Image: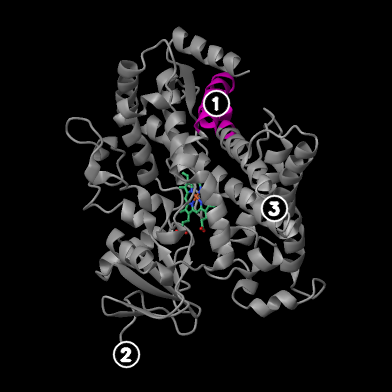
Amino acid sequence: TRRKRPLPPGPKGLPLLGNIYDVPKSREWLAYQRWSQQYDSDVIYLNLAGTPVVVVNTIDAAYELFERRSALYSDRPKMTMLNDLVGCDWHFVFMGYGNRWRERRRVFHQYFHPSAALQHRPRALRGARVLLSRLLDAPDDFMGHLRHMAGSLIIGVAYGLDVQPKDDPYVATAERALHAMAMAGNAGSFLVDSIPWLKHVPAWFPGADFKRKATEWRKSTTAMVEVPFKAVKNAIADGMAPPSMVLSLLGTLEEEDDSTHMEKLFSGVAAAAYTGGSDTTVSALGSFFLAMLLHPDVQRKAQAELDGVVGNDRLPDFSDEQSLPYITALVQEVLRWRPVTPLAVPHRLVSEDEYRGYRLPAGAIVVGNGWAMLHDENRFPHADEFIPERFLTPDGQLNTDMKDAELPAFGFGRRICPGRYLACSSLWISIASILSSLEIYKPLDDQGNPIEPSGDYTTGLVTYPLPFKCGFKPRSKAAEDLIHAAVIQLD
Ligand code: HEM
């Protein structure tokens, strides 16, 4: 009887190719949400040239499948190009569900769970203050400054290394690797992902260009894992290693441990922190700048709250968090309004399942449509508007009913982002610091008219606002002096 159950509804598709031409090449999450409404089903089914795909579009369905049935829904699709050929099998985000993944996730968790993440707050505060001075000195390169801040924070936490103000070799190595991973991991770009035995084709074989690309990309990703890890080991040998995740992990090695295995594991986990934490934070802060340009009223309201609590003779710090609910709500709204990873990272269903009378086939790729959940009009009325108040009670306190409402921005079930506590602290202190001391405004064109941002985004696993013009100036002379003084203190 189970076999006879229907698949979830979805567009009909072509013989053999299925829905390959139905799924748009960009912003697929919008099409998935539309189909979910059209077929009146929170799960929809697609056949991508023989690969079954289930898209989960509501928070209730996500809870039932990813959370309550997590033993079935925590695997990842196999990515032959990225894992086997480019050699990214050290990264636990791409690992199948099992002991290898569990071991790495456990190691990572020790350094990023809620109370461990508290220890990274001084670094996040420092990063936010350096960011202020960089925005003041060279406002045009604001995305570059975000990249520098996010990179320095993670490199600091993971390896204890200081990052150069410009052209840092560790950041450059990591950026090259991230680019290689984005290319190699792009779903549908490489036939070898659908026909894994092609990985055995020799590189000289006609049409085996993917093997040559993989060899090139492997060099960048390997360097990203090995170069900063070796730097820490050298610093330990010189007795000069500052505190870091890698230093502490190496300190746990026992004589009887297989040190080659353990070092591979540690270096992979540290590199996973960088790849998970840099682009995502940059994207979220890019959306924050965009939101402030488009909603000056929100900026003014946030600044009024900061002025009342922090005043104008100091910069905010984490001790202000409880007194600044509007800022916390604003951070939640940034994550909800323009989700960094609209479709999270795909999961895989390990064995056949049944949901609301539908059959979900074994091996299906299961995509959580976080975008649809965070733009559900029933939960978030006027979902496309930027309204931090939706996370507050009428008297301006954080609304406990909306606690964690932005969580789908961080994915689902056992695979939910393990770096989210660090991410939220770093977003919070950056946003509070910027709003308390800087004015974010639309620069003027040659005719003296404000330059409007398009508000458009890139598409892909991690989305960013397309390049836009944004101005930054100190809110007052006192604010400017505070920024300079804060940076001198840090030095
Ligand atoms: C705004 C910032 C961030 C967003 C929106 C974000 C989002 C996500 C999402 C959607 C996933 C996939 C979840 C799933 O499969 O269902 C994920 C996984 C992951 N994230 Fe984040 N992330 C952020 C920041 C960070 C930071 C700062 C770190 C590191 C400190 C990090 C490390 C990771 C790792 C290691 C994974 C893989 C988890 C696994 O597969 O078990 N992320 N993140």
Q: Residues within 10 Å of mark 3 (few under 14, many from 20)?
A: few
Residue in the picture at 30% in, 59% down: 59
Foreground residue among 388 and 472: 388
Residue type at tag 1? Arg
Is 355 on the left or on the right of 82, as rendered? left
Residue in the picture at 48% in, 59% down: 345
User: Where is 53 relative to 269, above or below?
Assistant: below
Q: Secondary structure at mark 2?
A: loop
Q: Secondary structure at mark 3?
A: loop
Determine the residue located farthest toward the left in the rendered image.
Answer: 394
Q: Secondary structure at mark 1?
A: helix
Residue type at tag 2? Lys
Q: Quadrant of the N terminus?
A: bottom left
Using the rendered view, name the quadrant where residue 452 is placed. Answer: top left
Residue 189: % across, % down: 60, 66
Q: Which mark is residue 126?
A: 1
Mark 3 sits on what residue?
254
Is 262 on the left or on the right of 399, as rendered? right
Foreground residue among 183 and 246: 246
Mark 2 sits on what residue?
4
Q: Which mark is residue 188?
A: none
**Label 1 vs label 3: CA separation?**
34 Å
User: Where is 440 relative to 241, above or below?
Assistant: above
Residue 323: % across, % down: 31, 25
